[in-house]
Amino acid sequence: MSEPSRASIRYLSSGRIVEATGFAPTATLLDHLRLTRGLTGTKEGCGEGDCGACTVALGRLVDGRVVYRPVNACIQLLGQVDGAEVVTVEDLSDGGELHPVQAAMVAHHGSQCGFCTPGIVMSLFTLYEAGEPVGRNDVLSQLSGNLCRCTGYRPIVDAALEACDSRPDHKPADAFAARAAETAARLAELDDGQDVFVGSPDRFFAAPASIDALASLYATHPDATLVAGATDVGLWVTKQLKDLPKIIHVGRAAGFNTVSIDDAGVTLGSGATFAESRAAVAAIDPDLDEIWRRIGSEQVRASGTVGGNIANGSPIGDSPPALIALGATLTLRRGTTTRSLPLEEYFLAYGKQDRRPGEFVASVRVPKLKSDQLFRAYKIAKRYDQDISAIMAAFRLTVDTGFIREARIAFGGMAATPKRAAAAEKALVGASLDDSSSWTLAIEALARDYAPIDDMRASAAYRRDTAQALLEKALIELAGETTRATRVAGFREGTDERVA
Ligand SMILES: Cc1cc2nc3c(=O)[nH]c(=O)nc-3n(C[C@H](O)[C@H](O)[C@H](O)COP(=O)(O)OP(=O)(O)OC[C@H]3O[C@@H](n4cnc5c(N)ncnc54)[C@H](O)[C@@H]3O)c2cc1C
Ligand code: FES
Ligand code: FES
């Protein structure tokens, strides 16, 4: 790591800078708030990122402006909040006066036992601070990671709409807005560009400030656990009670979360969260917007990264099938050496990825769709929000005068890894989108591509039947699209829009 490094983390809280040092590498933000600082307004419910009782807001500078996002403090590691403003429910009322979201919750009887209320209020606080016009669907999406077991959601939604959407100009009018410039200046001060290293060489929490420092530290400690958003790793700590003696947090490395768009595609820095990358992938295809929108909850999307979703090698991660179908390429780095490979080649077997000791996922390159390419992606889960997929399906077809010239099909939840459907892809070549009888071989071939398992999310038979139905659904929908495409000049080209 470059010198000098800092042996503490610092964050802004209630207008003052809090410095923490000597903490355990896996100390959680929730334990720090409740047990060390006595801020017991933030509650612990599930301890695994599902219920939202522990929601706090993290304020960070984005293009010079303070942006607040909700996170689950139970699975956020303390070290991750270096450089942020941490806002808890204790901070909301101003001189004894309730914050507008709190006042609306009271007015609409949005609380009964009150256990979920601090988390709900903090989620609504971040919606309020965003200062955008808010509709019912925005509120439902915002609250998708907050469970209430007793009040029922209608009064809470009513309160949210009143607090967040009733201002004519939608601009936040609270103490946070009033001191936004001062907060921005203090956050800028905290960003000192120093590497963070808390602990000893055998037991540490480290947060390198640059990608080079990250690469060098991980090459020196290939046995360390990388942490990006901790929406997976946090559960190893709270549920599996794993001792992770060496943690390297990738989230402070400058530029690691960069999202860049050019004429041919989108490059997502591995540290880009789902929230940060959603607009860029949505510009490739609206189905990606929907997939990104359905990952976990607002809290999970605010912390969880695309790099973590790929690196963890899960067969049921939502982004890999869509990215594989689009022909994405992964870049890995170890020390000063980088290499790239097609994303599908990264997944070798269950729990085994093509990643060498000390090597990390640096970025993923996603090509845009060409004018003769059509795309569909579907997530099948028991619930719309906050649920892991039973099946994730993605299809990219290259079409020439209605005939399929090339097919890329990838599924999650159907095998031990996210996997392409080689037999179905082959059988689709030459099929006509206008003739459903020419699809039969491909739909049948799908049954040879996968041997899915029975588990709590779905039976093997359900998975097989649904996968075949999804391929047929995609073909039906895309057949309608090409018909329109031939009628409408400039379809997709220059616009990236699907014709309605
Ligand atoms: C309540 C809840 C709901 C969820 N819902 C969904 C869902 O709907 N869909 C879905 O796909 N997932 C879901 N997840 C899982 C999780 O949010 C995702 O897998 C997320 O993308 C993980 O990213 P992260 O940044 O939090 O990874 P982390 O937890 O920080 O890390 C995950 C793994 O990747 C490794 N890692 C992280 N970054 C790198 C890197 N740059 N290079 C190499 N290795 C790296 C870590 O060492 C670890 O092994 C959910 C999780 C929770 C808690
Ligand atoms: S305690 Fe349930 S999400 Fe954190
Ligand atoms: S008010 Fe009791 S859990 Fe929501």
Image: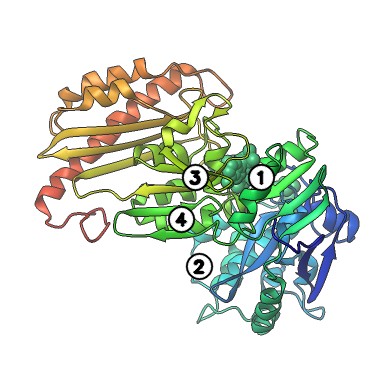
Mark 1, other Cα within 10 Å: few <14 / some 14–19 / many ≥20: many
Q: Residues within 10 Å of mark 4 (few under 14, many from 20)?
A: some
Q: Give the mark nearer the N terminus: 3 vs 2.
A: 2
**Quick one: SS at disc 3?**
strand
Q: Which residue is mark 4?
A: 278
Query: Is 189 or 430 nearer to us in this picture?
Result: 189
Distance CA(mark 2)–CA(mark 1): 43 Å
Q: Is residue 283 left or right of residue 315?
A: left
Q: Position of residue 183 (x, y in %)?
A: 69, 78
Q: Which residue is mark 2?
A: 134
- Residue 455 visible somewhere in the drawing: yes
Amino acid of disc 4: Arg
**Disc 4 and disc 1 in contact, CB within 8 angstroms:** no
Q: Is residue 142 above or below residue 443?
A: below
Return the disc, 3 or 4, that comes first in the chain's sequence: 4
Label 3 to label 2: alpha-carbon separation: 43 Å
Q: Amino acid at mark 1?
A: Tyr
Q: Is residue 445 above or below residue 311?
A: above
Please give the residue where the numbered disc 1 appears in the rendered image.
Answer: 218
